[in-house]
Image: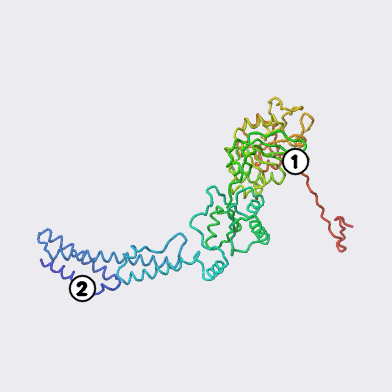
Amino acid sequence: MESTQRCSLRFSQHVQSSTCLRNASLTSAIGNGVRKAGAALKRAEAHRVREGTLGFWELKDKQKVEGVRRRARDRDDQHRRLDWLRQDSEALSDDQEPRLRDEELSQFTPRSTLRRARELNDQSANLTRTPDRCSREQAAKLARLRAQGVSTEAPSGTPYTEATSDFLYGTYPVFAALQARRRKLHKLYVECGGDALPAEVEETTTKIVSLAKKHKVPIERVAGSWSSMLDRMAGKRPHNGLVLEAGPIPQIPITMLKQMDRQTRSVHAQLRELNTEDKLALGLNPDQDTCQVSANRKDRSPLLLWLDRITDTGNVGAIMRTAYFLGVDGIILPSHGTAPISAITIKASAGAAEMLPIFTIGNESDFMTRSQHNGWVFYAAAAPESASTSKRPTKQIHSKNATQPFSGLDGDEHTTENPSPSDVLQSRPCVVMLGNEGEGLRSFLQNKADHLIAINGANSSTNLIDSLNVSVAAALLIDRFISTNLELRHRFVEKENDLGVDSAGINN
């Protein structure tokens, strides 16, 4: 009994000392007092339980101790929340929202804590209201841009005009799309007030804006939070402050290539059955059932490039850039298996894809058979060993002279029975077929082709590098058909008497 009284006296002393600091911040004395009182109460309670003499007031004291402990834990939680809020208000991050909801604020006690929390919340709100969490100078700059009609607040979602819209980015792709006008152009976004760009880019941007105004394309000048939105539109790729929202690039579905008109060197392709709406979307007349394929030069026949199941968008874009530069008259793509013509492809082609006619085919075998019947010659690119070991018989096509397979582009002795590609192109339209990066051209396409062509490497016997990138191979093959001329430029050095060197670079 005496031990119980001593424990109660000790507990009351600790409780009295802790009540003096009730309105102050929690100190170690409170925690130590509560812990010691709790331990003493537990020992006394265990003793009384064993003797069966636990009374009413002892039970009340136990509840009081538990209440003190609970309030101490709540106060510690409140202090931790306040520390977090102070740190968050001082250093805001992009992916964190520091403002607290009202139901969270209501959990803070006492009133002074709640008032402090509301003050910190208002400070955070003032910081987040500044566009892009920028400095005062930047905020003033954005205010001046807004006064000039520049939009500084981007929407939360990507601003699509149509579900099928593409966002073209970069200087040359945007310029080519505006110049070609093959797409449906929705809106041009021009970033203002950013970092200084090179003089050439600034000059091209001015031309692009003038061209957009000429063609009555809506222009929206943006800044501020639009910078991250433009990055999202461009897929986090460099865009030089120019993004053009446009419809998909026209890809005309055809079923065969017709005979060439030898006077005009032009060919018509038979369209697939389309309704009026699809024809208008492709830029065709509703009553039109064919489209024209003309050669860029009048001294040769049309040359088309067939890309079979090339899945890398960068390679497709590089091939289109090469084809446009060297003078190819069009691109043929299978309906399935080839990489789509996306904004990445347009960027890789430097805008050349906007200038090239693009045709799609469904039944490749039927397309080749009907086109060959109309006088078209198909060349299939193959590995050197495939072309050199080909034992298939000579294919008879509907012409006076039959063609035979040959291999290699260099060192071949071309005759009337084995003509060079450039000679064939002078009189007949041709199609060059390229396969994908891994497996090459499909076997049934090689079997139906009129010729197999290959590029023999000088070090192919080492098996270290036995092939070329498909875009590089396309450039070499196209050059053999079109035979572009190299321009040789001479540099003349002025005569310098002190060195004794004349204009030809020969010492006196």
Name which residue lies at 62% across and 64% down.
Answer: 196
Horizontally, residue 158 falls left or right of residue 506, namely left
Can you tell which quarter of the image residue 268 is in?
Answer: top right
Using residue 171 as the reference point, say whether residue 79 is left or right of it: left
Residue 207 placement (x, y as % from top left): 67, 58
CB of mark 1 within 8 Å of CB of mark 2?
no
Mark 2, residue position: 16
For residue 255, above or below residue 224: above
Single out the residue that lies furthest toward the bottom: 20
Q: Which residue is mark 1?
A: 482
Q: Which mark is residue 51?
A: none
Q: Amino acid at mark 1?
A: Ile
Secondary structure under the numbered disc 2 in the rendered image: helix
Q: Nearer the viewer, residue 20 or 345?
A: 345
Q: Residue at x 18, y 71 (%)?
A: 12
Out of 504 and 128, give the one closest to the viewer.
128
Q: Viewer-nearest of labels 1 and 2? A: 1
The numbered mark, 1 or 2, whose residue comes first in the sequence reads 2
Up/down of 475 relative to 378, above or below: below
In the picture, the quarter occupied by the C terminus is bottom right
Residue type, numbered disc 2? Gln
Q: Position of residue 19 (x, y in %)?
A: 23, 72
Place of residue 222 in the rendered image (x, y in percent of width and height, measured from the top left): 56, 61
